[in-house]
Image (spheres, rainbow, N blue to C red):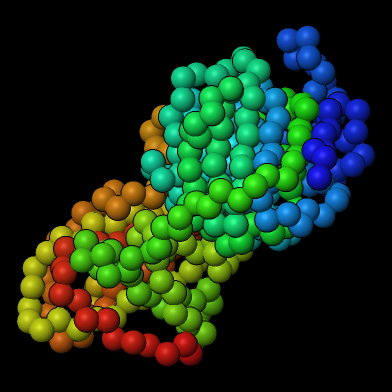
């Protein structure tokens, strides 16, 4: 197949941009598509069926705040794979049920720090394979970031581009490439349990009894975006029940986004808020944001949480008990 090439400043009609603000512009003498609206996702109208392909474009972020990237594997307008350039990093940020998830997908598995790219035109590319993707910058033949686990699975679906705050993109090229497998990184729930992460939960988005089983992501985070649509004020309940052979004392460590109340054996032990509020906080979910002493009893123990959503950057919960001998009590979906 010959590459598909789009200048973007004169063929925007080949894309679907919905209500987003996309227009032609010019930056440092180069014509381009200009995106100025937060979360602008623009999809190519043509279907892509190739399992292995390369997306590349020239991109520029004119100010200190701005993000521009490439999207692929779009199931629909609310679910797609996204890799973008920020002024000082590359970020893998799969969009799930309409919400960004960078507060969940943080750290070296999903991010790569960069020298400041503000005010520069740079070449940005993603090579997509059935099990993952490689991200390239400039003329470097080595990938800046390798993503072995695409969070939406096999990346079938539409392609396009994306921006958040003012940015420019031009000369988008799509071409089929040869397979170059990326080994998958399997989620090791046994290792996460050994590291004292709570890995098995029941979750519900109502006040009724419609509980469903859920397990954590590869980083130990319970990702609500995978199941629920994030809306300001929405609350998900989560509970985990397990057996201990004898009494124990430990510290629970937890992180979350955006607001949480946490109970152990029906006694409230913590509540707090953690959101995007720079420079005070970035809202990313780490495993050790808060620390609470807990007295566990012999027999059945329960951890219960209510987690409220206030922003669409990642909605989740991460809990470690400090216990390596938890025997989960299997609960059937209600």
Q: Is residue 278 above or below residue 222?
A: above
Q: Is residue 232 above or below residue 265?
A: above
Residue 334 screen position, x and y as percent: 48, 90
In this orientation, does residue 283 appear?
no
Q: Is residue 3 above or below residue 316?
A: above
Quadrant holding the N terminus: top right
Q: Quadrant of residue 165?
A: top right
- Front residue of 214 and 182: 182
- Front residue of 216 and 137: 137
Seen at 91% across and 28% down, the residue is 10
Seen at 47% across and 87% down, the residue is 333
Seen at 41% across and 58% down, the residue is 185
In this orientation, does residue 265 appear?
yes
- Front residue of 250 and 133: 133
- Looking at the image, residue 266 sits to the left or right of residue 13; the answer is left
Residue 308 screen position, x and y as percent: 48, 60
Residue 223 screen position, x and y as percent: 47, 62
Seen at 73% across and 27% down, the residue is 169
How many numbered marks have been drawn onto this rendered protein structure?
Answer: 0
């Amino acid at each position: 197949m010959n590459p598909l090439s789009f200048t973007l400043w004169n063929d925007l009609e080949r894309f679907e941009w919905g209500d987003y603000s996309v227009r032609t512009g010019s930056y440092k003498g180069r014509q381009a598509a200009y995106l100025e609206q937060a979360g602008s996702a623009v999809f190519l109208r043509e279907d892509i069926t190739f399992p292995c392909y390369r997306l590349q474009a020239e991109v520029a972020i004119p100010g200190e705040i701005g993000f521009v990237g490439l999207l692929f594997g779009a199931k629909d307008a609310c679910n797609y794979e996204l890799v973008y350039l920020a002024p000082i990093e590359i970020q893998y940020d799969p969009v799930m049920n309409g919400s960004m998830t960078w507060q969940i997908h943080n750290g070296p598995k999903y991010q790569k720090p960069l020298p400041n790219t503000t005010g520069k035109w740079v070449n940005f590319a993603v090579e997509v394979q059935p099990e993952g993707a490689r991200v390239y910058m400039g003329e470097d033949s080595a990938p800046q970031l390798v993503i072995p686990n695409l969070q939406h699975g096999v990346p079938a679906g539409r392609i396009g581009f994306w921006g958040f705050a003012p940015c420019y993109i031009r000369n988008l090229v799509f071409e089929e490439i040869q397979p170059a497998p990326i080994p998958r990184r399997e989620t090791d729930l046994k290792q996460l349990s050994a590291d004292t992460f709570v890995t098995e939960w029941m979750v519900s988005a109502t006040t009724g009894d419609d509980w469903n089983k859920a397990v954590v992501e590869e980083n130990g985070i319970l990702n609500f975006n995978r199941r629920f649509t994030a809306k300001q004020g929405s609350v998900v309940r989560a509970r985990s029940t397990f057996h201990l052979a004898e009494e124990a004392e430990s510290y629970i460590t937890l992180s979350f986004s955006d607001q949480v109340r946490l109970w152990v054996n029906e006694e409230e032990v913590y509540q707090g808020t953690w959101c995007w509020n720079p420079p005070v906080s970035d809202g990313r979910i780490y495993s050790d944001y808060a620390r609470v002493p807990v007295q566990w009893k012999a027999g059945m123990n329960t951890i219960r949480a209510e987690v409220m959503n206030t922003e669409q950057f990642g909605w989740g919960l991460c809990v470690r008990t400090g216990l390596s001998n938890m025997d989960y009590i299997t609960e059937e979906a209600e």
